[in-house]
């Protein structure tokens, strides 16, 4: 039942939000709705029995599909991330004004419903439904409230991902057709072992869709532009939660369904991921726009997660699980800082900023912590995940680890460079009148920072939560 | 049977009521009454209760597939008349006659959905087409309309000739016009059957505007008065598909090796030609003409795969496509400017209208949660069941991605671009009807079984 | 006379019709060519009808095999007549507006 609630609350409140014309009340409404989802999500952590976590109803009997939702360890973790992300986003962007704000918040909540559905669906066709549904509101959000070049950029993004999804749809159809039980249910598909040839074709059909979504080099070209042009709230959704859809889908569907093909192609995928990491890190180093810098840094992080997944050993996969959550928190934190900076100074160019730390010490401290978490310093949350992932990758192949490690160094360079340029040095005409952040911005950044340290010092609960998912995945993969 | 007889009768009633009722704005009410009568008649048809006892000598067969399609066609026509009835009356001075011709078309649709004999196929297709030649040219003073009607007429009768030759060759080989083709043994007879099948496929491809026989479609759809384009592109076109599917399933189902690959090539050509050309259109009306070609490509999958999924799928497709296209055309008729720019900023002026058009467009593009998605899904699934060709399915998917490009231009124009598009004269009743259509599209997309597909098994 | 002659004659007429439709520019002539196609089909139908009748009557005297094709011919004639009435009306309408029935004039719809 809880699983169903996680989708229904944002769905219903999202539709309702369209009818609230007053900007102030719709903001409150969206915040209350997202907090309600968060409560349900926390509740689901405490009640892990079947009654609360599984929901199934007959849906399309002719097609062998049912409306089945289920919460497992990984699902709980990612729904929790989604549930945390939205209130954080709503509070952080509270000051931004949107024209037609009822539509903006309605679409935001609908995208949350879609994301929840992706993480909850235990039926392949249902999964596809939600996979697409999460995309449509984001397209509208970015196209309507984004930057100057928003229309062509988001259109490219939409067509790109839609094309990937369509190819996956063909794959889904073939999976259904080959499966003797003629069913889309996860259990039935997990039980069936696909033949060698089928696996090798279907693997790529699915992988393409997931690789575009993550994105993995060379399918990443939509991502920096889209992040840059989208309104920050949407960028947070995209980078904090939506890219996890790709990773999640690999864990939930790709690896368990086609383990043999995944083994066969692991070098290609890990190779692409690692190349992407270096490539994205190098580009990040020469960026002047804060949003683009964070976007490229995100590609590098995702690349590492994808590589560790395909290494296929329990320690690496465990790292990915932890890191999916932590990356979501960290990057949302980074976007909050970018948003605060941009709102105050009207620019995102590093070259035009400087010396903010003198005027806004609280913001600077928060940023430094989040940035250090982004480069995975010990005691921060990302350290746990990256350490485990590197460990897993090391077990797979030393050389990939070395190359991937290089990107960590690059990440340190561009992150510290960014801090230095934006926050230290002398103030200029743009930044001399900077004021520090107010209490609710402090509060939200404090939440992020607390999460960073909590997960960094005491990662055990998160590891415990996802342990079963890791074990089942690794055993399927062997 | 009831529908076939009553629609012809009501066509005559329409014509005579034109004599006795001077006020031409009453015409649509007579037509609505007629459609309600036909729906009741169709209800009896569905339960095999015939109001007119007559021996039809097995020339017609009223199976649930065809009859459910007739229900869809009648409901679509009802929606069409409710939405655009006033526009039909504005085309010229002969409001009652236009509606009468629409009823004659429906008679043809009824025959095309239930023929069991090639003679009836011929008659059904002709009864559908001839009134349409007239309707296309209804705007007598408009040269575009003249030209469209002449073109449509010449192309239509040309394809009729080809269809007849196909029928005759089949008759020559088998000695019967029935749909159940007896096995032939001689090589020459075999060749005649194959040639007949190919000729029939070409003729029907003409009628449903499949490539490479689609070239008349954009011109005719563009030139015809927009209200009639709406009807032509939906009910009539889908009826052509029903005839196509019934012919290839019932008559040639056992000879898939003869024609299946040809149909596959036609599908690929149709999808590519329709989608690529649609991308370059500046007028929404013309874009919809090309979009109807590309949708035809998807519907042809039902012909390709002739199995249970294909039949369910084409019904769902018919409903989804008719609802969405009639809805978009109804809004288009109200617009002052038919280009994409004409829609700029519609979301500001008419938020509800823009939302509804978006839902229709999303359905045509095949986004999940709309009927358009499930119907495309059924089509592809059916073709996989029939041992589908992977290249064909991938082509279809690529084309579906291309179609997003031109469909979303409409959404972009309405929502993200500034402009002063203003639909003229939109009353609340019009909006309410469009809302019904949009809700139906979503319901069909979420839960098609209860609404449509289960009837297929029950009846 | 063997059936083949009829088939070839009918097919030849049909092909003349098709060629005329594809090459001629005068709407009336195109229309006549379409009629020619239909009549070629009629001829073929009658020929096949006779052929099937001849084959059947040898085994079962008094058979009605083949009548359906001859009935079909009448249907084609009726439909063709309906088409003529509509088609000529369209051509006349066209002529009133453009004073020409040359289909090369039909290019207003090309974009």
Image (cartoon, rainbow, N blue to C red):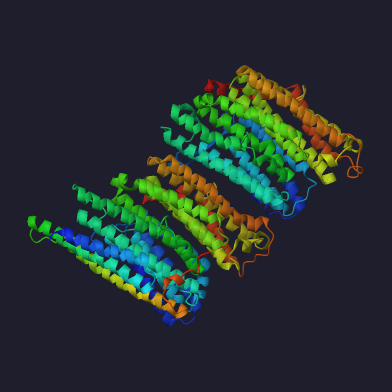
User: Could you say which quadrant of the image residue A332 lies in?
Assistant: top right
Say which of A403 and C107 sits in front: C107
Residue in the image at 47% along x and 46% along y = B396
Measured along the vertical axis of the image, is residue B259 above or below residue A335?
A: below
Measured along the vertical axis of the image, is residue B166 above or below residue A179?
A: below
Q: Tell me where residue A468 appears, x and y as whole percent.
A: 59, 23
Residue in the image at 63% along x and 42% along y = A113
Look at the image and tell me in which quarter the N terminus of chain A lies: top right
In the visual, does A406 lie left or right of C72? right
Measured along the vertical axis of the image, is residue B415 above or below residue A200?
A: below
Q: Tell me where residue A30 appears, x and y as whole percent.
A: 71, 46
Say which of B456 and A119 sits in front: A119
In the visual, does A318 lie left or right of B20? right
Measured along the vertical axis of the image, is residue B134 above or below residue A137?
A: below
In the visual, does B244 lie left or right of A368? left
Say which of B218 and A187 sits in front: B218
| Residue A141 appears in the figure | no
Q: Tell me where residue A286 appears, x and y as whole percent.
A: 76, 35
User: Could you say which quadrant of the image residue C23 lies in?
Assistant: bottom left
Single out the residue that lies furthest toward the front: C23
| Residue A351 appears in the figure | yes
Q: Tell me where residue B365 appears, x and y as whole percent.
A: 53, 51
């Amino acid at each position: 039942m809880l699983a169903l609630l996680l989708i229904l609350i944002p769905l219903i409140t999202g539709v309702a939000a369209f009818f609230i014309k007053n900007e102030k009340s719709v903001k409150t409404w969206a915040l209350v709705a997202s907090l309600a989802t968060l409560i349900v999500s926390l509740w689901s952590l405490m009640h892990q029995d079947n009654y609360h976590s599984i929901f199934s109803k007959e849906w399309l009997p002719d097609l062998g599909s049912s409306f089945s939702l289920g919460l497992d360890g990984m699902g709980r973790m990612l729904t929790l991330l989604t549930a945390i992300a939205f209130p954080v986003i709503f509070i952080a962007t509270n000051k931004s004004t949107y024209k037609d704000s009822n539509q903006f918040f309605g679409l935001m909540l609908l995208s949350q419903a879609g994301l929840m559905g992706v993480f909850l669906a235990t039926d392949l066709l249902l999964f596809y439904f939600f996979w697409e549904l999460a995309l449509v509101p984001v397209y509208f959000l970015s196209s309507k409230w984004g930057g100057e070049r928003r229309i062509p950029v988001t259109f490219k993004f939409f067509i790109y991902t839609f094309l990937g999804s369509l190819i996956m749809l063909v794959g889904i159809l073939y999976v259904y057709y080959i499966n003797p039980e003629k069913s889309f249910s996860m259990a039935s598909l997990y039980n069936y072992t696909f033949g060698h040839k089928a696996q090798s074709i279907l693997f790529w059909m699915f992988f393409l869709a997931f690789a575009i979504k993550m994105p993995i080099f060379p399918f990443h070209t939509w991502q920096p532009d889209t992040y840059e042009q989208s309104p920050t709230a949407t960028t947070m959704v995209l980078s904090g939660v939506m890219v996890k859809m790709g990773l999640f889908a690999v864990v939930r569907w790709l690896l368990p369904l086609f383990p043999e093909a995944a083994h066969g192609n692991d070098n290609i995928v890990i190779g692409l991921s690692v190349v992407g990491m270096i490539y994205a890190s190098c580009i990040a180093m020469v960026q002047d726009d804060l949003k683009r810098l964070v976007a490229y840094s995100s590609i590098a992080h995702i690349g590492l997660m994808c590589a560790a997944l395909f290494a296929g050993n329990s320690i690496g996969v465990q790292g990915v699980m932890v890191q999916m959550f932590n990356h979501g928190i960290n990057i949302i934190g980074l976007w909050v800082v970018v948003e605060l900076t941009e709102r105050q100074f009207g620019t995102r160019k590093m070259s035009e900023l400087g010396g903010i730390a003198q005027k806004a010490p609280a913001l600077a401290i928060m940023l430094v912590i989040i940035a250090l978490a982004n480069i995975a310093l010990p005691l921060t949350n990302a350290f746990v995940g990256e350490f485990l992932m590197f460990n897993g990758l090391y077990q797979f192949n030393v050389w990939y680890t070395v190359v991937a490690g290089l990107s960590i160094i690059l990440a340190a360079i561009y992150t510290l460079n960014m801090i230095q340029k934006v926050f230290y040095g002398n103030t200029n005409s743009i930044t001399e009148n900077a004021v520090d952040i107010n209490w609710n911005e402090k509060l939200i950044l404090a939440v992020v920072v607390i999460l960073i340290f909590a997960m960094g010092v005491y990662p055990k609960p998160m590891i415990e939560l996802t342990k079963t998912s890791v074990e089942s995945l690794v055993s399927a993969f062997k | 049977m009831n529908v076939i007889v009553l629609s012809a009768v009501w066509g005559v009633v329409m014509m005579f009521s034109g004599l006795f009722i001077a006020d031409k704005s009453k015409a649509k009410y007579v037509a609505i009454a007629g459609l309600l009568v036909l729906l009741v008649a169709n209800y009896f048809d569905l339960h095999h209760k015939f109001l007119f006892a007559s021996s039809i000598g097995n020339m017609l067969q009223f199976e649930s597939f065809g009859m459910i399609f007739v229900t869809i066609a009648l409901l679509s026509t009802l929606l069409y008349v409710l939405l655009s009835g006033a526009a039909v009356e504005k085309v010229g001075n002969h409001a009652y006659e236009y509606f009468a011709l629409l009823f004659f078309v429906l008679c043809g649709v009824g025959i095309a959905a239930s023929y069991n004999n090639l003679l009836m196929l011929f008659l059904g297709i002709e009864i559908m087409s001839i009134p349409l030649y007239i309707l296309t040219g209804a705007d007598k003073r408009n040269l575009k309309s003249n030209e469209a009607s002449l073109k449509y007429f010449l192309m239509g009768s040309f394809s009729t000739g080809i269809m007849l030759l196909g029928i005759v060759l089949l008759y020559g080989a088998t000695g019967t016009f029935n749909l159940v083709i007896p096995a032939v043994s001689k090589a020459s007879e075999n060749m005649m059957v194959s040639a007949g099948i190919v000729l029939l496929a070409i003729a029907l491809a003409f009628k449903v505007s499949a490539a490479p026989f689609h070239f008349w479609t954009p011109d005719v759809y563009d030139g015809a008065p927009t209200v009639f384009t709406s009807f032509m592109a939906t009910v009539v076109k889908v009826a052509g598909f029903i005839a196509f599917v019934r012919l290839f399933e019932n008559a040639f189902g056992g000879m898939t090796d003869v024609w299946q690959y040809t149909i596959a090539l036609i599908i690929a050509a149709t999808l590519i030609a329709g989608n690529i050309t649609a991308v370059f259109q500046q007028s929404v009306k013309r874009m919809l003409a090309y979009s109807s070609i590309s949708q035809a490509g998807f519907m042809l999958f039902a012909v390709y795969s002739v199995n249970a999924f294909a039949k369910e799928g084409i019904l769902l497709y018919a409903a989804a496509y008719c609802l969405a296209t009639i809805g978009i055309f109804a809004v288009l008729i109200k617009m002052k400017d038919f280009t994409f720019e004409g829609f700029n900023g519609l979301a500001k002026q008419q938020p509800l209208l823009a939302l509804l058009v978006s839902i229709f467009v999303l359905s045509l593009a095949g986004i999940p949660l709309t009927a358009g998605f499930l119907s495309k899904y059924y089509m592809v699934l059916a073709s996989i069941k029939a041992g589908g060709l992977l290249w064909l399915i991938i082509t279809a998917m690529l084309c579906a991605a291309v179609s997003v490009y031109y469909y979303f231009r409409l959404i972009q124009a309405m929502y993200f671009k500034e402009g002063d598009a203003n639909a003229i004269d939109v009353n609340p009743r019009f909006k309410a009807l469009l809302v019904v259509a949009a809700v139906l599209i979503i319901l069909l997309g979420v839960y098609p079984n209860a609404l449509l597909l289960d009837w297929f098994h029950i009846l | 006379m063997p059936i083949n002659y009829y088939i070839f004659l009918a097919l030849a007429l049909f092909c003349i019709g098709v060629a005329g439709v594809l090459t001629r520019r005068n709407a009336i002539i195109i229309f006549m060519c379409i009629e020619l196609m239909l009549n070629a089909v009629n001829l073929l139908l009658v020929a096949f009808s006779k052929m099937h009748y001849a084959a059947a009557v040898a085994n079962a005297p008094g058979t009605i095999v083949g009548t359906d094709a001859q009935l079909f011919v009448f249907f084609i004639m009726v439909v063709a007549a309906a088409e003529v009435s509509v088609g000529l009306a369209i051509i006349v309408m066209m002529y009133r507006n453009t004073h020409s029935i040359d289909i090369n004039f039909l290019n207003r719809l090309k974009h």
